[in-house]
């Protein structure tokens, strides 16, 4: 049963894994493989969205094997489960505990999750500190680029735009998957600092370079808005019309149409405003 359940789990077939692992846990309470089975069962239940069941299973895993080989995994999975159930304080406590285990392969994941939790709670100073700790404690982690970007977003939210810009300029020149978003937020930071011409160029360059990224539409819209705000009505209108054609279902499309009309009016093209 354990092999069936674990193999299904490793193959990503959580629906098949759960009953096999659950049966094993129930029928083989003294089996040496129990510590692995119960941890895997909790993880599978979390993946299936069965959060109350996962909470119970993972607590049992931790209680039965507090120093087990998968104790850190179960703590991390329980933290995620509790967070999804709205039990944020205990989730934070567990993230802190796992992040403090140097040998854990989940330590950097927990540190990132901790910073993200603080960020979502608008506790920006704590979030920034958590992200900076990830960079310091886990310099080889694949999450370092995410931590730097998130730290820059904290600075942006705190209106410390000069510090945010310095960090984003470095991030935008990297090769991580976060580069398009860093480029976008660099443009938005420049715009927030009143550097409208520079912001428009950054955002348009980003749109040209990362046209298929999730933030491409926002790059185009806010580049056009920066042009509109500095009185460059003709190019702003052109960009805004392009936006409405390319992204007709985007949440900013109504705003793009409004500013396109205002750009036409301001540019004396009244026939195009109606």
Image (cartoon, grey):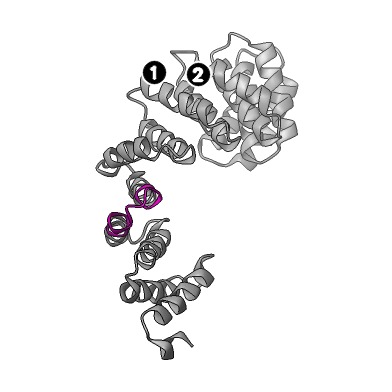
248 up-or-down from 154: above or below: below
In the image, taking residue 56 as reference, residue 247 lies left or right, namely left
Provide the residue designation for mark 1.
Answer: 137
| Outermost residue, bottom side | 271
Q: Determine the residue positioned at 54% across, 13% down.
A: 69
Q: Determine the residue positioned at 54% across, 18% down.
A: 98
Q: What element carries label 2?
A: helix
Q: Do the residues labelled 1 and 2 touch (CB within 8 Å)?
A: yes
146 up-or-down from 253: above or below: above
- What main secondary structure does the magenta stretch of the protein show? helix
Tell me residue 131's x, y (percent): 44, 28
Q: Nearer the viewer, residue 13 or 79?
A: 79
Range drawn in magenta: 189-201
Q: Determine the residue positioned at 74% across, 22% down.
A: 27
Q: Is mark 1 on a helix, strand or loop?
A: helix
The quadrant where residue 168 appears: top left
- Residue 17 seen from this side: no
Q: Which of 141 and 248 is in front in this view?
A: 248
């Amino acid at each position: 049963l354990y092999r069936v359940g674990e193999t299904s789990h490793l193959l990503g077939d959580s629906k098949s894994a759960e009953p096999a692992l659950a049966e094993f846990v129930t029928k083989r309470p003294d089996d040496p493989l129990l510590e692995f089975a119960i941890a895997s069962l909790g993880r599978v239940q979390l993946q299936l969205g069965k959060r109350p069941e996962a909470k119970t299973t993972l607590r049992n895993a931790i209680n039965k094997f507090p120093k087990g080989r998968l104790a850190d995994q179960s703590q991390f999975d329980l933290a995620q489960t509790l967070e999804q159930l709205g039990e944020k304080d205990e989730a934070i406590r567990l993230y802190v505990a796992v992040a403090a285990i140097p040998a854990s392969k989940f330590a950097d994941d927990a540190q990132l999750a901790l910073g993200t939790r603080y960020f979502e709670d608008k506790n920006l100073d704590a979030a920034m500190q958590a992200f900076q700790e990830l960079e310091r404690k886990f310099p080889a982690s694949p999450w370092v680029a995410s931590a730097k970007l998130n730290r820059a977003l904290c600075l942006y939210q705190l209106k410390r735009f000069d510090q945010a810009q310095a960090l984003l300029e470095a991030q935008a020149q990297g090769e991580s998957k976060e580069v398009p978003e860093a480029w976008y937020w660099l443009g938005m930071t420049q715009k927030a600092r009143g550097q409208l011409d520079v912001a428009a160029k950054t955002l348009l360059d980003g749109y040209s370079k990362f046209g298929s990224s999730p933030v491409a539409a926002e790059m185009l819209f806010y580049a056009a808005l920066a042009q509109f705000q500095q009185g460059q009505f003709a190019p702003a209108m052109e960009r805004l019309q392009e936006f409405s054609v390319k992204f007709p279902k985007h949440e900013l499309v109504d705003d793009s149409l409004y500013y396109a009309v205002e750009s036409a009016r301001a540019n004396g093209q009244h026939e195009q405003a109606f």
